[in-house]
Image: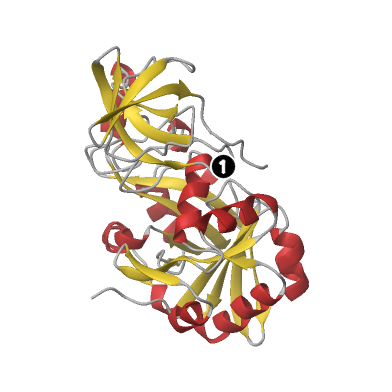
Amino acid sequence: MDRRPYLYDLHVELGAKIVPFGGWEMPLQYASGTVAEHLACRHDAVVFDVSHLGTVRCDGPEMFDALQSTLTNDLNKVDPGRAQYTHLLNDDGFVVDDIIVWWVGADEFDVMPNASNTEGVTSALPGHDVTDQRCVLAVQGPKAREKAGTVDPRFASVGRFRVERFDYHGVEVRVAGTGYTGEAGLEIAAPNEVAEEIFRALVAANITPAGLGARDTLRLEAALPLYGHELTLESTTLEAGLGWVLGWKKETFRGRVAVEHERERGVTRLLTGIATPDRQPLRDGADVLVEGDPVGTLSSGNFSPVLGHGIGMGLLEPGLAPGQPVTVMLRGREIDASVTALPFVQKES
């Protein structure tokens, strides 16, 4: 049976349509609908409940070395009080999960895996799962900090990829300048006992509640990979065009030998953007052809509310140039499309 987030009843009260996702029952959209929520994030501010994402708390003097030798990115690039995007690979170099690490204090780390992958992370790293003890509220959009700051001015002061913690009504709240929409924003890890109060206060500050439907179209426009789609146990970091998360200067990370071999021989697939000339949405699983020859399959696809046409990403043969015509086989139909540069919508700084 799917798990319910701590704020489930609040989402129902606010008119959310609930759907299963990653073993959880989560809001897909609220009464305003996915497109309106998407555009509110691009132009104003929204709040998502992303409590289905895991939190593995890794505290202790041994944790830096454990994370450094296991995860791909190099923690020496950052310091306490920073967040870092990284990958967990298996020994064959395939992606077990993509992760955000919040370096909270000198020997304190919150490792944030995807919804269905928490167990895979706890099996690879020491630490304990505190997912059920907190909610994670993602406030995203160009006015996210400004409006969240009316709830508590300390929310507005958290910089991009910075991590801060402070006392909020008697409990510790952890906040990072991270997100998954391509917009500025922050993610608030709040203990359950204050999570509903904070969520209601954010909505009262005229921040639109948004569901996972908008979160998916937003991350697609920003060309952010989704685990289970662009990143899987059959794909690699280099294929996704994310070689910058591989810490070649450090001594080791799990899967390094396999990834070194891949780097030497070159990738056979590369994450590529595809766009339709009209409102026809693209869908994952659709085959992509060039002059009748298959070059790969879309891993994600949808309609772009900002651009007004269909977009998709897939691991396709390398060397396809922006503007190159392609055919997408969508449910037995041939759809004219073209290769396009990523991201589809330029991310905010």
* Mark 1 neighbour density, 10 Å: few (under 14) some (14–19) many (20 or more): few
Which residue is at 69% across, 60% downward? Answer: 144
Q: Secondary structure at mark 1?
A: helix
Residue 232 versus residue 179 in the image, above or below: above
Q: How many marks?
A: 1
Residue 25 visible to an observer of this rendering: yes
Residue 185 vs residue 322: left or right? right
Residue 57 vs residue 308: left or right? left
Q: Locate residue 287, reporting x and y percent.
A: 26, 29
Q: Locate residue 147, reporting x and y percent.
A: 74, 66
Q: Locate residue 223, reporting x and y percent.
A: 49, 38
Residue 217 vs residue 201: left or right? left
The colour mode here is secondary structure
Q: Locate residue 120, reporting x and y percent.
A: 27, 58
Q: Which residue is mark 1?
A: 77
Which residue is at 27% across, 30% downward? Answer: 333
The amino acid type found where label 1 is placed reads Lys
Which residue is at 61% across, 83% downward? Answer: 197
Question: Dividing the image into 4 quarters, which one contains the C terminus?
Answer: top right
Question: Dividing the image into 4 quarters, which one contains the N terminus?
Answer: bottom left
- Quadrant of res 116: bottom left
Residue 334 versus residue 71 in the image, above or below: above
Residue 193 versus residue 71 in the image, above or below: below
Residue 157 visible to an observer of this rendering: no
Residue 159 vs residue 231: left or right? right
